[in-house]
Structures are given as C-alpha cells and as structure tokens.
Amino acid sequence: MVGAMPPEANGNGYSAMHLQLQLPAPPPKQAPRAEPECRWYEEEIDDDLKLCYALNSVLHGGASKYQEIALLDTKHFGKALIIDGKMQSTELDEFIYHESLIHPPLLFHPNPKTVFIMGGGEGSAAREVLRHKTVDSVVMCDIDQEVVDFCRKYLTVNREAFDSDKLCLIINDARAELEKSRERFDVIVGDLADPVEGGPCYQLYTKSFYERILKPKLNDYGIFVTQAGPAGVLTHKEVFSSIYNTLRHVFKYVQAYTAHVPSFADTWGWVMASDHPFDLTAQQINERIKDRIDGELAYLSGESLISSTTLNKSVHRSLLNETHVYTEDDARFIYGHGRACCA
C-alpha cells in the first residue's frame, strides 16, 4: 500500500519519495521536424569564389544546339536567365542593364530609325528600343530558337515587344546575317552572351568582325554599342579592357561606361563606338529622353549617363594601357561556369 509505511527522512528533512515526486516529467518525444529542401544556383567566379542564389524552382533547363540554357525562379531576384552557366539577367534588376545598353546610343544618335540587335533573345533589348518614337524598324537576330521560344513563354514583360509590327525576328548567326544584309542601320547593338570558351559568341567581339562586317553596315553617324562584361576593380581586365581596346582600333570615338547590377554582384561595362563624337550634355540628353522616349526611364537620366562615363582610377588606367586586341586566334574569356544544386 502506498504510504502505509512512513518513508525514511534524508538530511534535509525531505523524504526520498517526496523528492522523487517533485521532479518534472520529461517532455514527450516528438518526431524530428522535416526541414524544407533548399535549392541553390551556384556560379563560379574564380577557383575559390562562388555566388549563390536561393531558388524557388527551375522553370527550364537543358542544352540547345549552341549552348546550355536555364530559366530559374530565384527567391530574391525573380526569374533569371542563365546561358552557359553565367547569369544574363533577372526580373528584379534587368532594367539597369537594358536601359544602359540601349538608350545611350539611341540618344546620342541624331535621329535613329533603324536598329539591328545581335542576340537579345529574351526580348528586353527590343522592348527598350521600341520605346523610342523615332524608330521605324528593329531587326533582332538571335542564333538560338530555343532561347527565344522559352523567353517568349516565360518573360511576359516582353510579350508586347515580340508582338510589335516594327520588330523583325530572325533566327540566325548574327555575323552571317549582317554579312549578307543589303541594309544599313543607324544603331547596331551587341546584346550577346559573355565570351565563354567554346561558346558561340566570342567571334563577335573580334577586330576583324567589327572592321570588315559590322562597321560597313552602319549608316552615316551610325553608332555601335556592346555589352562588355564585368568592369569592377578586380574584374575589368577579364574582357572589358580588351573589348574597349579592340574597338579603338576600328572607330574614331570609343566611349566606355559602367553601372552596378546587383544580381551580377559587380559593376558592369558597356562600350559605344562611332566615327562621330559623343558630345551631348546632361541637359541635352534629358531633353531627348523627354521628347523621344515613351514612358519614364527607371534608371537612366542625363546626369547618370554622363557620370557613368567617369571610371575609377584603376579601371581608367587599365583601359588606357590595354594592348590586347580580340582576334579569332587570341581571345580572352570569362572564367567559370554555373550549376544548379541542392544544399
């Protein structure tokens, strides 16, 4: 019988049974909590450096005839287009890249009516060109039908551009298309993937291409612009300084400019080239923005465009001292490759 015999007291005056009854009961065991799977996209920047982007999902992944392609839904930047393992653009901040690529050459041109885009399969470059009231026709030439098809499907912001009567979409090698074209253009845009070893684009950064094929297809007062890769203090010597120097061997006036693109985690570079000077003031650029462009620009203004041409001392010196010229046999390439993985 419980309590029939008095328990023996301990030195503190409490019985052992009393002590035992005062101990708290252990919490009930719970099944281990299942952690949600977290998927990441990794992009190698150097041997010992990677960028990681958390993913909601992989919308498309595979390889076309020309390159590896992925369309990712990232947690921070929204939809992201990846080609040959390198981030091309993201939904959140692509406006920085595409406004910087398209509007400077069209604003410096006195009256741009015809534009040829090399690459640009996602449609964002064409979208920005078509905002200019002076433009009558845009030719967009991308080598990869698969890239164009899934960008039309998933990047809804550009559907209006793809449906425009002013846009002529051609699936072909831009070099071959320009070479056979009888038309000349006011502005030619290089919205190409970075020069990656084994990729389809590096020959479109060479002196012979610029000199023999591209420049003869420009009208008087014509302007060429190209994206030119990372342009940060630590990264500008990869390809940016070489592209700039190559164009200096072909055109009388060459203007480099930069902007920070958050999803690239670096400063990015573009280069404009022409045989006529880039001599507008910030006020004149703002007046042209107001008169020529439908809607308000989210990033670019006359003041920001002029300031973007002022490079820091390190990058400025490198551009002045660069000696490398892109040729088919002597090209520089962007390092690294990206991959989707589970962490």
Image (cartoon, rainbow, N blue to C red):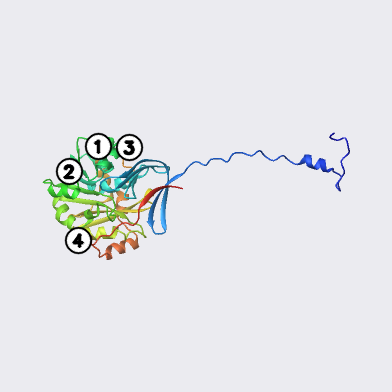
Name the residue located 16 percent from the left edge and 57 percent from the top edge.
211
Instruction: Give the class, few, some or many, for how many residues have Cα within 10 Å of label 4's Cα (few <14, many ≥20).
Output: some
Which kind of residue does numbered mark 2 sit on?
Answer: Thr
Instruction: Tell me which numbered mark, 1 or 4, is placed earlier along the sequence.
Output: 1
Name the secondary structure under disc 1.
helix
Question: In front of the other: label 3 or label 2?
Answer: 3
Q: Which mark is residue 114?
A: 2
Instruction: Tell me which numbered mark, 1 or 2, is placed earlier along the sequence.
Output: 2
Instruction: Give the class, few, some or many, for how many residues have Cα within 10 Å of label 1's Cα (few <14, many ≥20).
Output: many
Instruction: Give the class, few, some or many, for how many residues have Cα within 10 Å of label 2's Cα (few <14, many ≥20).
Output: many
Would you place residue 116 above or below residue 153 in this image? Answer: below
- The answer to whether the residues at label 1 and label 2 have Cβ atoms under 8 Å apart is no
Which kind of residue does numbered mark 4 sit on?
Answer: His
Q: Which mark is residue 162?
A: 1
Instruction: Give the class, few, some or many, for how many residues have Cα within 10 Å of label 3's Cα (few <14, many ≥20).
Output: some
Where residue 230 sits: x, y (%)? 33, 55
Q: How far apart are labels 1 and 2 at the CA level?
A: 17 Å
The residue carrying mark 4 is 249
Instruction: Tell me which numbered mark, 3 or 2, is placed earlier along the sequence.
Output: 2
The residue carrying mark 3 is 154
Instruction: Tell me which numbered mark, 4 or 2, is placed earlier along the sequence.
Output: 2
- The answer to whether the residues at label 3 and label 4 have Cβ atoms under 8 Å apart is no
Which kind of residue does numbered mark 1 sit on?
Answer: Phe
* Direction from residue 315 to residue 186 in the image, left or right: left
- The answer to whether the residues at label 1 and label 4 have Cβ atoms under 8 Å apart is no
Q: Residue 58 or 62: which is nearer the viewer?
A: 62
Q: How far apart are labels 4 and 2 at the CA level?
A: 25 Å
